[in-house]
Amino acid sequence: MNNQQLFENIKKKGSFLCVGLDTDIRKIPPFLLDTSDPIFAFNKEIIDATAEYTVAYKPNLAFYESEGLEGWRSLEKTVQYLREKHPDIFLIADAKRGDIGNTSSMYARAFFDKMDFDAVTVAPYMGEDSVKPFLVYEGKRIILLALTSNKGAFDFQFGTDTITGEKLFEKVLRISQQWGTAENMMYVIGATKAEELEGIRKIIPEHFLLVPGVGAQGGSLQEVARYGLNEQCGLLVNSSRAIIYASNGTDFSEKARESAKETRDEMFELLKSSGLLS
């Protein structure tokens, strides 16, 4: 899915919402625990309830890996279900991988060949040779961690070069553009750092950004849109807990749908006011 195709789906749905499938078996409605695959049963209901308002889903791999082989099976079934029932969805593996070249090539094979994700989150700390193996897959993308939404982002990401004054996350943005293009690279920019988006857009005006931190983490959707939108929208804003755990009862999917619709409606108005919807 290229940028134009992603933008067309955003316009069609009036939404740039990404729903994070951070499915914790300890938090899903208890009655689902009696099913043969509680994680997949939960995901399926969430997907069916929210797909109308969503352009992307982002399973966080930690929640599946923590359940061992059963968790991987649930993830595989989730991916297959999305591909069969909702082929227009952009599918992100939130895996935060990145290692020496031959290891990264195996990670890329796992997520692109075996699991059929559209994109995978990648940590840039080890440099170009740890990232390039993901970029050889035509039609697939990496989403490079640049500026994250957690408190620990200040430990390293805002470190400033004493000579140039450039922050570390800005250096990541600048140098990494030499590795790929706006069609095969995206960046993670946390919604809780929305005040940085204006400067970030000067460095990477054309790239899509994956923006976590809206909802439970307190990021402002209006601020993200104000500084982050570009001519093709250029944003996928993720919400996880605020949507998938909107209720822990038998009405969990209905409440998830309501939460997703509320977010979509806000996004629709932001897209319209920005002139991106006719």
Image (cartoon, rainbow, N blue to C red):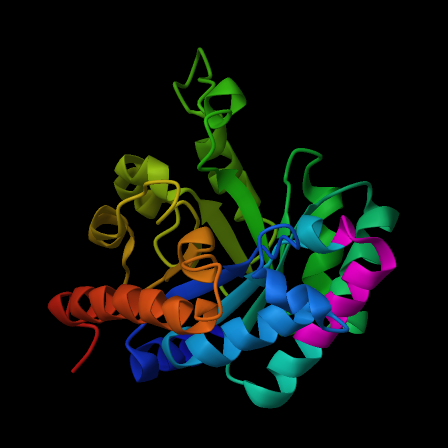
Is residue 169 or residue 97 the one in the foreground? 97
Q: Quadrant of the image for the N terminus?
A: bottom right
Q: Is residue 5 left or right of residue 278?
A: right
Residue 119 seen in this snapshot: no
Q: Is residue 84 left or right of residue 11?
A: right
Q: Quadrant of the image for the C terminus?
A: bottom left
Judge whether residue 17 is colored magenta. Answer: no
Q: Is residue 214 above or below residue 135?
A: above
Residue 179 seen in this snapshot: yes
Residue found 30% across the figure and 71% down from its top:
261
Q: Is residue 237 above or below residue 267?
A: above
The residue range painted magenta reads 65-78
Q: Residue 178: where, in percent of width, then height?
A: 56, 48
Is residue 54 or residue 113 the one in the foreground? 54
Q: Residue 11: where, in percent of width, then height?
A: 30, 79
Residue found 44% across the figure and 33% down from its top:
170
Residue found 51% across the figure and 83% down from its top:
88
Q: Residue 175: where, in percent of width, then height?
A: 54, 39
Judge whether residue 77 is colored magenta. Answer: yes
Q: Is residue 115 left or right of residue 47?
A: right
Q: Quadrant of residue 162?
A: top left
Q: How many marks?
A: 0
Q: Main secondary structure of the magenta part?
A: helix
Q: Is residue 199 above or below residue 165?
A: below
Q: Residue 239: where, in percent of width, then height?
A: 42, 56
